[in-house]
Image (tube, grey):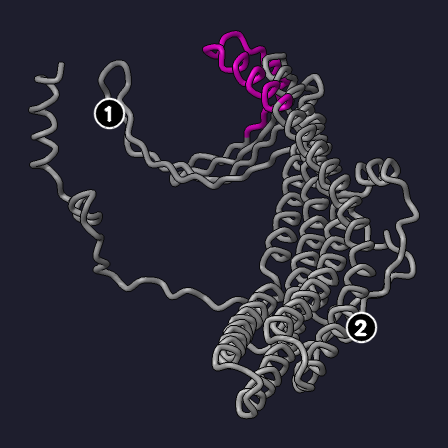
Amino acid sequence: MCLAAAPAAAQWAIFDPFKPDSRAAAAPNLKWDANITLPAVGSPRQAGELAAGRPLTLPELTEFALRNNPRTRQSWLAARAAAAGVAIEKADQLPTISGAYAVNRTQQVTNQGAVVPWQTRFGPSISFSYLLYDFGVRGLQIESSEYRLLAANLSHNRTLQDVVFQVEQAYYRLIGNDALVRSNEQSLINSQTALEAAQKRRESGLATAADVYRTETLVAQAQLNLTRSRGELEKARGQLAATVGLAVNQSISVNPLSAPPGLGSIETSIGALLEQARSTRPDLVAAEAQVRAAQANAKAASRAGLPSIEVTGGGGHTLFNDNRAAASNYALGLNVRIPIFSGYRDTYTARQAQMQAEAAAASRDALVKQAEIEVWQGYYDLTTARSSISSNEAQVRSAEQTAQATLARYQGGFGSILDLITAQQEESNARVQRIQSYLDWFTTLARLQVAVGATDLIKAAGGAK
């Protein structure tokens, strides 16, 4: 069998007028070189402008992102396409009408062998058909498209929530890195103060060269931490710009984190939050709509092999190029279509549709379980973040007082350089942990709200503006 195929392959290789293989790479390990002008990548669309010259608030950035993030436009267009799909299915409820205008020129031969002169016929015609009854297949298809539209609209709503959450994450990351830069700047000042104190004590003979070297190492480490935090700040600024739909290199200014977040309490129990997520999370309701769309499609597929009743009709007007009179014709019929055998296509189509409906139900169940985990974890993460803020505040106050007292003792000629370095490091670590606790509160609250599908879980809670 392979020997017989070889000559045919060689024949096709010789007869190759369009040479399609020449339009791809010559071998798997070779790069394809473009011999045509490649299409230019278009610039993302932008609706409106952000205010310049002043810090931007989170609501301003969120509103701009909802109008300019490509994902919101993508989900909105998908919903509009699904709406058009409903109209397509409903179009089957109307009759199909088509018109034509034909011109035919023929020369025929009679049974006796005589040649009939050329004849030219021309004229308009019209035909129509209308499905009267199909055992509910048409209605089920419309029902399926309606559920698909519902799922698309809910998916769009979920996309809006996701974009808001992404903006919040990027915004809080930016203000957190900004606070970390200011904290590291203070740590650098403190370490430089310690270096100056060590140098003075060295000049007076109260400290060794090793003390100066240790404080110089502390200053170098503080400078390194500051450089790294500034780099992370610029990365966070670019991430926020890209999230809201701006160019990544466009600078965005926000208000710094100047006070602890206003803490509130969750007035809803965890059980009520889990139940609320089932009714308020758009993606869960969209998954249920997808299940019902698949179930309606499966019912329609199971009835595809049943008879259908159709009415047809038409009419035409024929004219001739000679002296014969024009003629009109009309037709009206009632058709009963009874599928007999389709090569088991209808059987397997119905089976496939049923499996797809069951798969959609399994996907919905998996999403529900995932939502429950997200709500459960977010609830207790927020509780932990709330209690951590007060603990970190006390830790920072204690570390700052300890560092100040240790520095005063060292400058007065008492205490060791190791005690001073340790106190300053503990102060720096406490400030970093306090910043992290603020960010944990903001981001965990945002994560819980998107997990539940609500925006008002916390009462009397403040935030970064």
* Residue 48 in view, yes or no: no
Residue 155 sits in quarter:
top right
Residue 141 in the image: x percent, y percent?
A: 67, 28
Magenta residues?
329-358
Determine whether the residue tagged by mark 1 lies in a helix, strand or loop: loop
Residue at 25 percent across and 61 percent down: it is 36
Toward the viewer: 184 or 82? 184
Picture quarter with the C terminus = bottom right
Judge left or right: residue 366 versus residue 9.
Answer: right
Q: Earlier in the sequence, mark 2 or mark 1?
A: 1
Q: Is residue 288 above or below residue 428?
A: above
Q: Is residue 150 above or below residue 61?
A: above
Residue 355 magenta? yes
Q: Amino acid at mark 1?
A: Val
Residue 20 in the image: x percent, y percent?
A: 20, 44
Give the numbered dot on residue 259: 2
Give the numbered dot on residue 115: 1
